[in-house]
Amino acid sequence: MKPKIQQSATHRLARPVKTSATFFPAIAVAAVSWLTLSTGKAETIISVNFQGGNSVGLASTDSTGVHAATNWNNAVGVTGADLALKDSTGAASGVTLTAYQNDGNALGDNSADTGNASTQATLFGGSLDTNGVWFRPASFSVSGLSAFTTYDLVIYYFSGMPDWVGGRTGDFSVAETSTRHYFKSMSGAENLTSFVESASTTPGTFDVGNYVVFTGLTADTASVMMEHTSDYMSVVGFQIIGTAGTGQPDPFVTWITTNYPTLTDKTAAGDPDGDGMNNQQEFAFGLDPSSGASVNSITAQLDKTTGTFSYVRRAPAVTGLTYTVMTSTNLVDWAADASATDTQVIAATNDGIQTMTVTLSEAPVGTTQRFVRVKAQ
């Protein structure tokens, strides 16, 4: 976690081959194979606006942010006061904003610069700043995040009063991860009309923008610090985009961090070996995310007479996923083959890998074309 979070890919294992006068595209030799993984977990969005001074808070119906959402939480409390946060539906989230006025931080007012002509202008109208002290870090913490299997943290910033200039630099860090984002502020009214990501994680390289994103976080607490090289740099708000979970360890996260600790990208949507299959797809279908040669889960191609084929997967008890055989005649309309049989033919390995033999409810002989895919969800 991504709106719903969904990763899907189409993996072509063989080309259609003409047999007599009829095509038989299916999972087979002389066929086409698709392995598709879709994850449809629900998202929770929690949004916080640092409202200060004379600035105007966001109304419950105001929608703004990179992940457009309503029911923003306006942080207007006093030093040391924790703020229980609601989510974008207005329901209590169980997440708490803490320590957002530590070390001399204050809630500043930029409304004279931004105005309130739009919800984005209102968001940038107040800030968590450094109380007029140059180079002092601004910080805040959020706790109670263990209910999410993973979450992304979007942090909005800008260079505000008194001269409203751009080009100021700094970096954001989250204590629970080693990643740092290096930013350069936008200038003037640019902040009020568009959201631009500062994506650099390279020291000394500063991307111009007004927000950064930390992805794939899993810790119960996120402790954020903004350090900068000039005065009047401010944090104006943040959003948490969480994938709903049970509070238990995510099987994917446990698997990839345990077995592939040196991968450059361990996120579910990442593809560090560049083979077109993302990490979660490789997890689901018994592949190796560190090897570009590990792309084929089909171990026995379709027998057009019997309607059987075999493929490799990680056991549902390991992945927490459900595997469904689906068929289509046009690659647009897919239906689950509810009567297909799915039998384990080779015992699972220590990594939970199974070899499954599937028998379709109807063999493709006599049909004009048939496409088959296995979906894990």
Image (cartoon, helix red, strand yellow):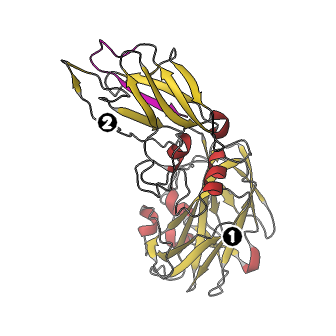
Residue 359 position in % (x across, y down): 48, 19
Task: Tally the marks.
Answer: 2
Single out the mark in the foreground, 1 or 2: 2
The residue where tag 2 is placed is 14
The amino acid type of the residue labelled 1 equals Ala
Q: Residues within 10 Å of mark 1 (few under 14, many from 20)?
A: some
Left or right: where 238 falls relative to 202: right
Residue 370 shown in magenta: yes
Of the numbered discs in the image, which one, if any, rests on residue 321? Answer: none
The residue where tag 1 is placed is 175
- Circle 2 — which element? loop
Q: Are marks 1 and 2 in contact (CB under 8 Å)?
A: no
Q: Which residues are drawn in magenta?
A: 363-377
Magenta highlight: main SS = loop
The residue nearer to you, when weighing 136 against 182, is: 182
Left or right: where 212 falls relative to 82: left
> In this rendering, does residue 45 appear at all?
no
